[in-house]
Image (cartoon, rainbow, N blue to C red):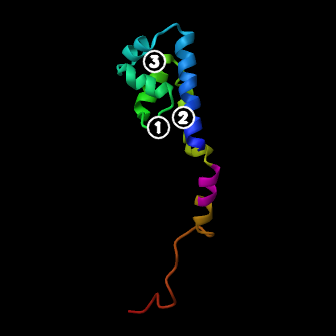
Amino acid sequence: MEVTERVARLGQRIRVARIRRGWSVADLADKAGINRNTLTALEQGKLGTGVGVCFTVLWVLGIDKSLEAIADPDTDLHGKALEASRRPTRAGKSRKASDDYDF
């Protein structure tokens, strides 16, 4: 499944970033305020690991800058197209039927 593979790749990237910094699992877990088992699960790409844990670890590693692009509504071309298709074709107030002056 594509999601599982992407989460596994993210975990591998986090592990590489940790190792490049010369940090042990215990070091990074301590800096992030999480349990070592949780960090290990994140690095192994376990789907049950919370998104908050992931964001915190990325922040501690200093590689969180690209998170701003995740689910950015300005880059959601499909969503923009759907929204545009639901817009009225004519701007302005809708007018009542011919009985506007019926008292």
From the viewer's perspective, tell me whether residue 52 is left or right of residue 87.
left
- The residue sitting at 35% across, 19% down in the picture is 33
Decide if residue 30 is on the left or right side of residue 2.
left
Task: Give the dominant element type of the magenta stretch: helix, strand or loop.
Answer: helix
Q: Earlier in the sequence, mark 1 or mark 2?
A: 2
At label 3, which amino acid type do we have? Val
Label 2 sits on a secondary structure element that is: helix
Report x, y in % for residue 94: 52, 75
Tell which of 75 and 36 is nearer to you.
36
Percent coordinates x, y for residue 22 in the rendering: 52, 7
Lower position in the chain sequence, tag 2 or tag 3: 2
Proximity of marks 1 and 2: CB atoms separated by less than 8 Å: yes
Q: Is residue 82 above or below residue 62?
A: below
Per the image, label 3 sits on a secondary structure element best described as helix
Q: Is residue 89 above or below residue 43?
A: below
Per the image, the residue denoted by label 2 is: 7
Q: Disc number at residue 99?
A: none
- The type of residue carrying mark 1 is Leu
The quarter of the rendered structure image containing the C terminus is: bottom left
Give x and y (percent) for residue 17. 56, 16
Give, as a single range, the part of the protein colored magenta.
Answer: 77-82
Residue under pointer 1: 47
Q: Is residue 1 left or right of residue 48?
A: right
Looking at the rendered structure, the kind of residue marked 2 is Val
Task: Residue at 59%, 30% (x, y): give it.
Answer: 9
Residue to which mark 3 is pinned: 60
